[in-house]
Image: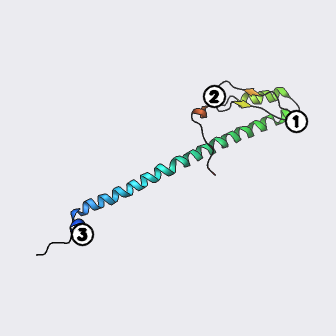
Amino acid sequence: MSPRPATERRRRRFGIRAKIAGCFAGVVAVIALLVYLYFPGRLEEHAYEAIVSKANSIAEVAAYGASAGVVFDDTDAIQDVLAAVVQNRDVVYASVTDTVGRESTPVWTSRPPSSARAPIRQPRP
């Protein structure tokens, strides 16, 4: 019998189970790497978009509520709307401006917003 070539010996060194396990481990490693690189940025973008959407919704509701006060120059009605708006725990500052650009008495809260636990960067263009 002649000795087997070196490549055949290397190929036979690992059994079929080891080869399948190695391929499976490689696939799992590639998937884990993709999840590690792709999803954090994507989740950050979604969180930013959700905060912007919530802020726009709050602003629209406040504008609708304060519209009569602006039209009739009723500062008490505007202050009532602003006081209700700052009850939301994510609102720190609220103000209404009329069509001329005059600002009503702004309302500040003394607490930081609940979403300010971690800074959120703007999504990459």
Instruction: Write the residue at 36% across / 57% down.
Output: 26
Q: Nearer the viewer, mark 1 or mark 3?
A: 3
N-terminal label among 3 and 2? 3
Q: Is residue 36 left or right of residue 125?
A: left
| Horizontal and vertical percent position of residue 66 | 80, 34
Q: Distance between the Cα atoms at labels 1 and 2?
A: 32 Å
Helix or strand or loop: what does disc 2 sit on? loop
Label 1 is placed on what type of residue?
Val
Label 3 is placed on what type of residue?
Thr
Instruction: Write the residue at 81% across / 30% down.
Output: 78
Q: How many marks?
A: 3
N-terminal label among 1 and 2? 1
The disc label shown at residue 7, or none: 3
Q: Which residue is mark 2?
A: 112
| Horizontal and vertical percent position of residue 87 | 68, 28
Q: Nearer the viewer, mark 1 or mark 2?
A: 2
Q: Is residue 97 left or right of residue 60?
A: right
Label 2 is placed on what type of residue?
Pro
Q: Nearer the viewer, mark 3 or mark 2?
A: 3
